[in-house]
Image: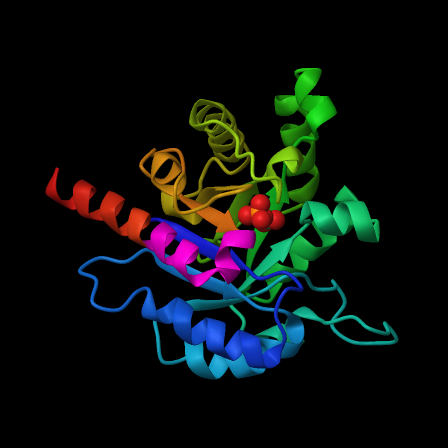
Amino acid sequence: MKTIIANWKMNVGVRESVALARGTLLTLRGRKVSPALVICPPFVALSEVRKIVARSSAGLGAQNMFWEQSGAYTGETSPRMLQELGVSHVILGHSERRALFGETDEMVNKKVLQALEQKLVPIICIGESADQRREEQTQQVVRDQLMAALQGVRLKSSDTIMVAYEPLWAIGSGVAATVSDVIETHRFIHLLLGQVFEQAAPGQFSVLYGGSVDAENAYGFLREDEVNGVLVGGASVKINQFKGIVQAAAEVLEAKQTS
Ligand code: PGA
């Protein structure tokens, strides 16, 4: 399977989210095979988008959450609240949250533990900066972030974890990583996950690529076995672009069925 995560960030309000959710689901219509879709609208639009997504095979995701269940945490949203809203997935440790809101590896770890506790699928975002890449520290950074995020995780057979490899320099820049770089880093992440969770079934993990994915480059990433899907920001709020990405995933899946 290939999974496409649409991260709408703070780009659409409630009304726009409803229209975009309808348009997004239309991209699946009439297909013999479809990728798995997860739509992550802003918090304020979750309950309206839920009504639309409920009639489809798509999942509903949040873009963040806090790790406590309730209490005096002004402005925060708990895992249980997300569950109540029908959320199945949650993006954690996105680089924008790390850079702009001071999220640390330790905070991401607390969120991952609580997400799993509440039966939410964590989408753990990791990736190196341009400087770290230049210094050839990509693997070290990815390893440190992943290990920190997974600290203390005891995987149950029903748990699923998604890791999104998102090099910081590729996010929103229009310059995606090369397919060969993505394959190399994804192999490394798959290897680490296999080492950490020796007993896990292969389907319990997915490794997705994110960073300037669009209708033109999506096929190149998605056709690779190491790439279980893509996390799409900018192109997920442009319906024609998103349609192209869904089309690319469908073509890859169809080709795999016939081969
Ligand atoms: P982008 O964002 O597709 O706009 O680069 C990806 C992300 O931030 O998850």
* 197 falls in the magenta region: no
Residue 84 in view of the camera? no
Can you give x and y, in whole percent of width and height, for residue 109 in the image? 71, 48
- Residue 113 lies in what quarter of the image? bottom right
Residue 113 in view of the camera? yes
Image color mode: rainbow
- Residue 67 lies in what quarter of the image? bottom right
> How many labels sit on residues?
0
User: Quick one: 194 or 48, which is closer to the camera?
Assistant: 48
Can you give x and y, in whole percent of width and height, for residue 20 in the image? 48, 71
Can you give x and y, in whole percent of width and height, for residue 240 in the image? 40, 59
Kindly report the secondary structure that dominates the magenta region of the rendered protein: helix
**In this rendering, position of residue 28 left or right of residue 40:** left
Residue found 40% across the figure and 71% down from its top: 23
**In this rendering, position of residue 188 left or right of residue 259:** right
Establish if 38 lies above or below 207: below
User: Quick one: 92 or 42, which is closer to the camera?
Assistant: 42
User: Quick one: 45 or 86, which is closer to the camera?
Assistant: 45
Residue found 51% across the figure and 79% down from its top: 18
**In this rendering, position of residue 229 left or right of residue 163:** left
Q: Which residues are magenta?
A: 233-246
Residue found 51% across the figure and 51% down from its top: 232
Residue found 18% across the figure and 42% down from its top: 255
Extreme residue in the left direction: 258
Q: Quadrant of the C terminus?
A: top left
* 243 falls in the magenta region: yes
Establish if 211 lies above or below 74: above
Can you give x and y, in whole percent of width and height, for residue 14 in the image? 60, 79
